[in-house]
Image: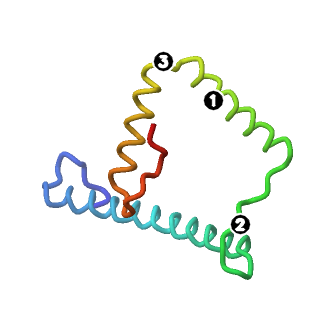
């Protein structure tokens, strides 16, 4: 089949070649995925403490400062974009929705 022209091949032969290529590619991707999963498990194992919980990776002060500044900027944008009436309606809706699904008869928020 290596010397055949594609135009001379039957549909069944073409399907077989395509299936073989797809299977080979999927095997390659799965191998890469399995390697990635194994690396992640090793990383989680290394970063887990003896008590069994996951510890977040350490960040440098510069990395943490950058994340903090990004969060502050996001909050600033929300404050500037916000419509006061819409925010009030949203808050009232959230209070009502959260109080409706409580197992306790006591409201989550103090009633006005």
Sequence-first tag of 2 and 1: 2
Q: Nearer the viewer, residue 77 or 6?
A: 77
Tell me the residue at 84%/41% (across/down): 62
Where is residue 64, by image quadrant?
A: top right
Tell me the quadrant of the picture where the N terminus can be found: bottom left
Location of mark 1 (residue)? 75
Residue pointed to by mark 2: 55
The residue singled out by tag 3 in the image is 83
Q: Residue furthest front?
A: 112
Pointers 1 and 3 in contact (C-beta within 8 Å): no
Residue found 66% across the figure and 69% down from its top: 54
x, y percent for residue 8 = 17, 50
Q: Residue 96 versus residue 48: which sits nearer the camera?
A: 96
Nearer to us: label 2 or label 1: 1
Q: Is residue 81 above or below residue 4?
A: above
User: In percent of the image, x 63 and y 29: which residue is there?
Assistant: 75
Mark 2: give few (<14), some (14-19) or many (20+) Cα within 10 Å.
few
How far across and down, in percent of the image, does residue 10 sit?
A: 13, 55
């Amino acid at each position: 089949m290596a010397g055949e022209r594609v135009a001379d091949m039957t549909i069944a032969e073409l399907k077989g070649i395509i299936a073989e290529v797809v299977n080979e590619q999927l095997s390659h991707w799965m191998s890469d995925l399995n390697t990635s999963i194994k690396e992640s498990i090793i990383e989680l194992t290394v970063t887990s403490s003896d008590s069994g919980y996951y510890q977040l990776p350490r960040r440098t002060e510069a990395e943490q400062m950058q994340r903090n500044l990004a969060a502050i900027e996001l909050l600033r944008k929300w404050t500037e974009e916000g419509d006061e009436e819409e925010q009030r309606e949203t808050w009232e809706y959230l209070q009502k929705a959260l109080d409706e699904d409580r197992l306790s008869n006591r409201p989550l928020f103090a009633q006005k």
